[in-house]
Image (cartoon, rainbow, N blue to C red):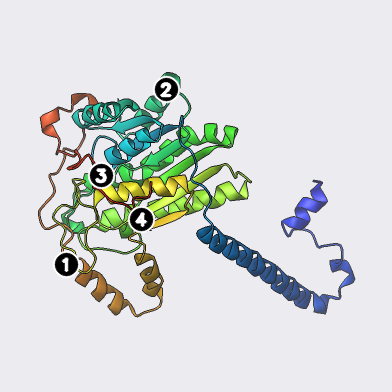
Amino acid sequence: MNIETQEYINGLRPGPLSSEIPECMRNKYTLVQAIFELIVTLLTALGHLFYEIYKSIFRDPKKDLKGQIALITGGGGGLGSLIALRLARLGCVVVLWDINKQGLEDTVKLVKGVGGKCFGYVVDLAARDDIYRVAKQVKKEVGTVSLLINNAGVVSGQYLLETPDHLIQRTFDVNILAHFWTVKAFIPDMIDSNHGHIVTIASMAGHVGVPKLVDYCASKSAACGFDEALKVELDSKGIKGVRTSLICPYFIRATGMFEEVQSRIVPQLNSNDVADRVVYAIRTNENVAVIPSYLRVLLPLKWLVPWACVSEFIRGLVPDAMPAPMPMPERKVKADSLKPNGKLESRPMTLIPPARDDRRV
């Protein structure tokens, strides 16, 4: 592309017909051009809409994950361990990252117990250098990661003015900044092979604000924006083989984070059901999974009704997100110095999925 063409695209040089258009008509010409571009954009969007409707009716076969290397952050317990078990049954080589050494060892044993191949690494996800160091170690000892699941999360569970600064920093370090470092560590290999999948475990709290969860909601909102911007950036660069999925569940039971949450109308989610839904989203290349799905219909109303209605509904839906104070960690935790008894238990309450006929994995 020559310099003249590039300057024309960037709007720095008039087009080939601009010099022939009288000065008084150029604004009208620009308006017509803008309308034409808008119509083309709308028609393109309409085509994508019909395509997605077609896909929802005639679903593509679920992709085979056998042999892929899947890395799960926060895999030492809770939702991460349940996802690990399911991916192992589908033939993935599972790599687990967690700061909880005991929980990590237990989950590795569980995965190996179902016949899976699993590796566990103690990683402080609040430390960028530690993430980059262990990422290099994983590439050397296990291989190229093709499925990255950013699942690790922490919550402080206090009113903003009662939350110490270092806990707010920890929330953002683990819940969102770690996503930047893990993606930067593993996505270059995915792009080179034009094959990979990045999964962001966010939350419905990333779309609405909840009292006592100001730092948590803000970090999860950032995670939603991170996934969307990354998705668009990959599209803009023409990278079609690397997919991303955003998972936005409601409060989940048996993960060690929201056990005591007071929730009305919408019940807390079963962790096994959420794990199934995550794996289903991965296998079908789903862009966004809202759990439960009917909440997707309510989200647009947030921008259409008066704010007083939104605030009243949220406070009625979740009277208290954290009735009991969470155990607060020390200001600085080193992975090597963690002892099993010094960490809140985060193992899954149930390891065998309940018997159901409609499990979609």
SS state under label 3 = loop
Residue 346 sits in which quadrant?
top left
Mark 2 or 1, closer to the camera? 2
Q: Which mark is residue 248?
A: 4
Disc 1 or 4, which lies upstream in sequence? 4
For label 3, the crowd category at 10 Å Cα-Cα, with few meaning under 14, some 14 to 19 and many 20 or more, is: some
Task: Provide the residue designation for mark 2.
Answer: 142
Q: Which mark is residue 353?
A: 3
Structural crowding at the residue carrying mark 2, measured as other residues with C-alpha within 10 Å and reported as few (<14), some (14–19) or many (≥20): some
Q: In this orientation, does residue 105 appear? A: yes
Label 3 – label 1 distance at C-alpha: 30 Å
Q: Quick check: 207 above or below 143?
A: below
Q: Which mark is residue 319?
A: 1
Sort mark 4 into few (<14), some (14-19) or many (20+) by Cα contacts within 10 Å: many
Q: Is residue 126 visible?
A: no
Q: Amino acid at mark 3?
A: Pro
Which residue is located at x 54 percent, y 63 percent?
A: 53
Between the C-alphas of marks 4 and 3, the distance is: 21 Å
- In the picture as drawn, the residue positioned furthest to the top comes out as 141
On screen, residue 231 versus residue 204, left or right, reads: right
Q: Are marks 2 and 1 in contact (CB under 8 Å)?
A: no
Q: Badges 4 and 2: C-beta atoms under 8 Å apart? A: no
x and y, in percent, of residue 15 in the image: 82, 62
Rendered residue at 83%/75% (across/down): 23
Label 2 sits on a secondary structure element that is loop
Q: CA distance from mark 2 to mark 1?
A: 46 Å
Mark with earlier residue (4, 3): 4
